[in-house]
Amino acid sequence: MLKYLVKRLLKAAVTIFFILTLVFFFTRLSGDPTDWILPDDATEEQRIEMRHSLGLDKPLIEQYGDVLLSLFTGDAGRSYNYLRPVSELYAERMGATVRLGLISFALAAAVGVTLGTVAAVKRNSFFDRFTIMLSVAGSTLPNFVLGILLVFLFCFVLRLLPSGGEDGALSYIMPVIAMAVAPMANIARLTRTSLLDVLRQDYLDSARAKGVPEHTVLIKHALRNALIPVITVIGLQLGTLVGGSVVVETVFSWPGIGSLLINGAKMRDYPIVIYGVMLISVAVTVMNTIVDLSYSLLDPRIRDNA
Amino acid sequence: MNGEALIDVRGLKKHFAVNRGFLSHHAEGTVKAVDGVSFTIYRGETLGLIGESGCGKSTLSRMLIGLSESTEGEIFFRGRKVDKRTINEIRTSMQMVFQDPYSSLDPRMCMRRIVEEPLRIHTHLSRAEKLERILPLVKQLGFSEDDLKKYPHEFSGGQRQRIGIARAFVLGPEFIICDEPVSALDVSIQAQILNLFRELQREKGVTYLFISHDMSVIKHVSDRIAVMYLGRIVELAGKNELFSDTLHPYTKALISSIPIPDPRIHTDMKPLEGELPSPLNPPSGCPFRLRCGKAMDICSSSVPQLREIRKGHYAACHLFDGDAGLC
């Protein structure tokens, strides 16, 4: 188990290293940040001086080394536009993203598993067919399209909800829906499929034959087994919720790390982009690793092979 | 044999409605999985039930143990009618061993919890008391105490089926339904499991309903044999009677299908032709007439009823219409 853990962690570290390298070179290819920082009529001398003060005149390899080193020193540099350490900027905005992500995630998991379970138990009923249609619709509709439609309906037509910003409980409703619908649909569909598969197994009949009450059969025997693959997907969704929030946060001008990252990318604010992408990739990788490990805890069949 | 009746089944039917359509249901017809079955199982005996796949053997056993409700007919256990209210009291004396040992054990429970679960539901024993109850049984079935901690995937097919047997026996039941308990096992393990069933029967006096589609297995374990075809019992007799004085053409075909392990012996074995007709659209009259070499005119117009042709030997075939009452 320990060997497996070490192997997984090493893999995760290598993944993050690759992402960082990729982002570093892509940002350098995106153009000159001084175009954005300095006014249009700035002289060439001013530009050279600016590049020097940002450390952009050093050889590429040296800059790359600095970025890698900054991972270990904790000093990820200053934002070109905000003139403040990026770690500070992200720390300020992390709360809003995590709140939105966790609420959406909890909603998606709870509603998704419930819908999927009821659909599987009442297979071929009207509710089941309705859930399938809803979940296909939910997982194919991109979250920003849904977000814009929601804004149009609840804000411009009905005038019930604020169009953006984080300001009280009402402001959470639309972003949470926009973020939760797709994972909810996936979780519901997978729970249904997985549970249908388990419901066919003889060990449920053998539990019933022993006299186990029906709801206990469903929860203790069927759901416990059916949720193993579902938990994988739930875990992966949790990771992508952080990444997926980038788009939704932009639609709802949510004061989280997603909108910070998008603005940073627009203005070629290299440190912001690199730090943001790194945060998200670490979140996703950590989640994947946790899912992998929990898998072997949940399923005794995998425990031994690990 | 003719002791006390433990199970009495009268006119048992199970019909399934077949539905098609999206967002709505259109009844397309009914499948008569079990269509009017009556028989008695006596205390201490093994009644073998044989038939092809899809003839209703498993549906019948599921109704007996209360896993599915009958459409019509009655089941009596020790003279008491089995229904929703009484099934839970009867559960402790009626258990089942399932066909597929790979899917009949919950993969997330260790062996101890699997075998203990009936005790957890039906008794209030402490952990130590439960262990005390299951240990002798588990040891008799060839396991060690350490095996109790293991999970199903760590056992072989034969071992898993022995766990299934332990689970069925832990409450000390009087009646056990064995639904093709060896058909998923290697032939080398089959005999071992069959002997185990017999040994447990001798020791604990349980009654079996033993279901199989394998005539040689049925012959090995049964005292009496019931032959099922398309939801009906077509012949029912003591084992020796059935083999020495076979009445129904379907039973004859089944018996001639037992391979004889001697190449010098030639049999006039005629394999059954055709397939089991669709239960959604069964032939008129006798369900077997389309595959029967001795079909007569009457077979297409009237359904033969199961009647006692000789003492204790029942058959449902028009060939013996004249013999009725000759016993």
Image: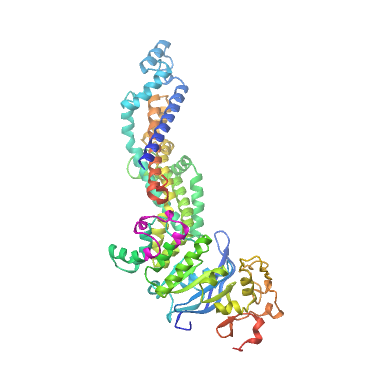
Residue B149 within the magenta-colored segment of the rendering = yes
Quadrant in which residue A42 is drawn: top left
Residue B66 in sight from this viewpoint? no
Image mark count: 0
Q: Residue furthest right?
A: B297
Above or below for B140 versus A192: below
Q: Nearer the viewer, residue A187 or B241?
A: B241
Q: Which residues are magenta?
A: B137-161
Is residue B19 shown above or below B306? above
Q: Is residue B283 visible?
A: yes
Q: Quadrant of residue B309?
A: bottom right
Please tell me whether the stretch drawn in magenta is mainly helix, strand or loop.
helix
**Picture layout, residue B95 above or below residue A136:** below
Q: Residue at x 29, y 67 (%)?
A: B125
The percent coordinates of residue A48 (x first, y second) are: 40, 13
Residue A45 place in picture, x, y as percent? 40, 10
